[in-house]
Image (cartoon, grey):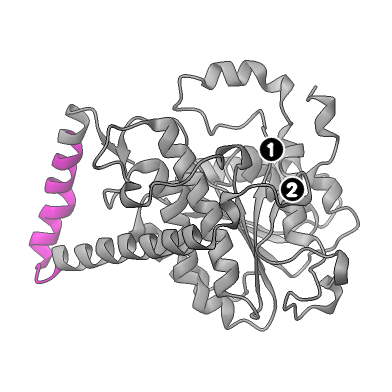
Amino acid sequence: MPLIGYGGKTGSEMLKGKDLSGQTAVVTGAKSGIGLEITRVLALAGCRVVMAVRKQASGEFAAKNLRESFPHGIQVGEVVVRQCNLASFGEIRAFAAWLKDQPYEVDYMVLNAAIKGTPKWYTREGHELQMGVNFIGHFHLVQRMLPQLQAQQDDVRIVAVVCKDQMDTTLRMTDINFSKVNYDGAKAYKGSKIALALFAKELAVRTEGTNISVFAADPGPTGGTMIDKYSPMFFGRAFSASFLKSVAQGAATPIFALVAPLASETGSKRRSLRGGSGGIKSGSLLVDCKVNTSVKIYHSTYQAKRIWEEAEQLVDRSVIGCHVANAGMGKEEQWVMAFILRPLMDFLLRMFGMRRY
């Protein structure tokens, strides 16, 4: 049983009585844990859910089990699985392009995927893995989808799943990839979650007055997830799961961020979602299904702007590097690069205790 102090609010309760038929949500990291629970409750409310997962096969397996768990005789939303490894800009761009070609618009995005406690591993573009997946990958995904989302007729909500307890320090802007200092996996994770929260804050500023609302939502300390699977603390955390929120409770605040009425000053085209003075304002940090104003770093407009600019530079350098690397290559050279040189590089990285994800 979870601690009584956390209350019994669940994602299902946040959606009680709501009909999301005809709407579409994209959930990253949807194969397990909170992401899978968010997928489940949205689908039960009639919402189509695109599960963005690292591996297609494991995502399909999770979706199959999920579909089989739905009660018989009720109409549920379609569950679609699509591979999108956030450690690869190529897969992120392919996923965004695929979404653009679909006959439906995206109403909700949940930036949930996260990895924690890894050794010094790297993304395909060479970014430190936790920062690369938890923040930079989500940044690039939203960056690719933003023009499409802003061109839509209806409202869009983007929810970044963050961790308030990690936001107790400032973020080292000059070396977020740990290229100049000794690597510390715990600090890398902390930095990635701070960066994601600041990204949500800055995105809200940059989309103010548009059809897009952005929120940072903290699920709270939740057991039964796989986020710690690379950490030495994983088994200890699994053992202590009974003292944490359940996955169903962990999903409550992200779901609340998706469907709670908006404040009157937030530009919503759906009048039914305007909550007047009692609604939530785009850019809010939500904890336990309430607006939280106590986290100092989250309200630093300077740091939020800086992390956005830093991410833009990292993405631009990576994309330009890919183009330069492939420029002028014939099909034979591209084949050698893809099937000989890159695998060889991965092998050498593993020999020296490093890894691409």
Corner quadrant of residue 213: bottom right
Residue depicted at x 19% and y 35%: 349
Crowdedness of circle 2 by 10 Å Cα count: few (<14), some, many (20+)? Answer: many
In the image, residue 266 sits, relative to residue 258, either above or below, namely below
Q: Is residue 111 visible?
A: no
Main secondary structure along the magenta-highlighted residues: helix
**Dividing the image into 4 quarters, which one contains the N terminus?**
top right
Nearest to the observer: residue 315 or residue 48: 315
- Residue at (72%, 68%) from the top-left corner? 23
Residue 276: quarter of image: bottom right
Q: Please, what is the three-letter code of the amino acid marked with disc 2?
A: Thr
Give the residues in magenta: 327-347
Residue 46 vs residue 314, the one in the foreground: 314
Measured from the top left, where is residue 42 in percent x and y?
74, 54
Q: Earlier in the sequence, mark 2 or mark 1?
A: 1
Left or right: 214, with 196 as reference point: right
Q: Residues within 10 Å of mark 1 (few under 14, many from 20)?
A: many
Tag 2 and tag 1, C-beta contact below 8 Å: yes
Q: Residue 263 appears at what percent x and percent y?
A: 80, 70
Q: Which residue is mark 1?
A: 220
Q: Which mark is residue 253?
A: 2
CA–CA distance between discs 2 and 1? Answer: 9 Å
Residue 339 counted in the magenta span: yes
Is residue 137 or residue 49 the one in the foreground?
137
Q: Is residue 257 toward the left or the right of residue 353 in the image?
A: right
Please state if 206 lies on the left or on the right of 221 as rendered. Answer: left
